[in-house]
Amino acid sequence: MKTRAITGFFFVIVMLASVLINWYVFSAFFLLLSAASLAEFYGLIKTSGAKPNAIGGIALAITLYLLFALINVPVLGAGWHTVILSPGVVKGLVGVAIVLSALIFIKELFGKAVAPFANLAYTYFGLIFVIAPFICFYALGFTQMTYSFHLPLGFMVMLWANDTGAYLSGRFFGKHKLFERHSPKKTWEGFIGGVIISAGVGLLLSHYYTELFWGHWVVIALIISCFGTLGDLVESMFKRSIDVKDSGGILPGHGGLLDRFDGLLMAAPLVYAYLSLVV
C-alpha cells in the first residue's frame, strides 16, 4: 500500500507538471508516453504468440504524432517555429509515414511468419487503440488555436474523480456487479458514484474555466465517466484474453501504463469528437 501511495503521488505530480509548464513539455511528454504505451501494448501481444512489428509500429506512431503536433502547434513567432511549421516539413512527415507503412508490409511479405496478416493487424491496431487516443488527448490542448492547459487538466481531474468516486462508492455501497465477466470488483453503485463525482467536478471546473458553457463541462464529465469505465473494461478483457494480471510493472503498485491510461484510451476520442462536432 505504501509503494502504491508513493507511486500515485509522483504520478500525479508528473502528470500535472506535463500540462501546466508549457506546450513544449506537454508535447514532448505525451509523445514519449504514447510511444512507451504502444511498446507496452506490443510487448503484451507478443506474450500471446503473435509478432507485431514493434519497431515499425512505434516509428510510424511517432511520425503520426509529430505530424499532428506540427499541424496544431501554436505559431509563437519567427525563427525556428517558421522553419518547423513550413509546408515542406509537414509534407516530409507525410512521406515518412507512407514509407514506414510500406516497410511494415514489406517486412511481413518477406518474413517467414505463420500468420503475417495477424502480425499486421496487431501492429496497426496498436496505432488505433493506443496512439489515436493520445493524439486526441493532445489535441484538447489546442482547441483554442493556442495552447491552453484547461481542457487537458480538466480531463485528467474528471477522470481521476470518476475513478476515486467509483472506488469509494463501490467499496461502501457496491452490491450489484457491473460486468463480472471481465471485472469482478466493479459494481453499478460504484459506476453511478463515479459519474456523480465526475459531473460535480465538471460543474466546479466550469466556474474557473469559462471558455466552455457549464453544460458542456458536465457532458464531457459524463463522457469521461461512461467511456472511461468502458476503457477499463476493455483493457481488462484484453488482459484476460492473454492471461496477464497487469499490463506491465513500470508503475510499482499500479501496474503498467495501459493500466493507468485505460480510461483515457476510450474517453479521449469521444471528448475530442464532442468538442469538434457539438461545441
Image (spheres, rainbow, N blue to C red):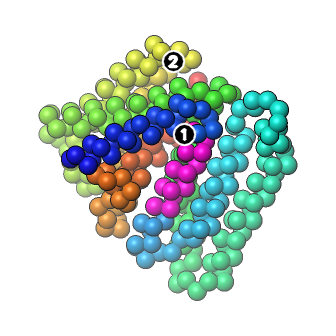
* Main SS, magenta residues: helix
Identify the residue at horizontal 44%, vertical 19% (top origin).
Answer: 205
Q: Where is residue 1 in the image (x, y as percent from the top left)?
A: 20, 47
Q: Residue at x 80, y 40 (%)?
A: 80
Residue beneath disc 1: 137
> Is residue 35 covered in magenta?
yes
* Residue closest to the eye, 31 or 210: 31
Whichever of callouts 2 and 1 sits on the residue coming sooner in the sequence is 1
Q: In this view, does 266 lie above or below 159?
A: below
Q: Give the range drawn in magenta.
A: 26-40
> Is residue 265 depicted above or below 167 in this figure?
below
Residue 23 visible, this orientation: yes
Q: Where is residue 251 in the image (x, y as percent from the top left)?
A: 36, 52
Q: Which residue is drawn at 66% across and 83% down?
A: 110
Please indicate whether residue 1 sits to the left or right of residue 209 in the image.
Answer: left
Camera sees residue 214: no
Badge 2 amino acid: Tyr
Q: Is residue 231 magenta?
A: no
Q: Identity of the amino acid at label 1?
A: Phe
Q: Classify residue 76 as left or right of residue 252.
A: right
Q: What element carries label 2?
A: loop
The number of numbered badges drawn on the structure is: 2
Instruction: Say which residue label 2 marks.
Output: 209
Residue at the image position 21 percent from the left and 33 percent from the top: 169
Who is closer to the viewer here, 231 or 30?
Answer: 30
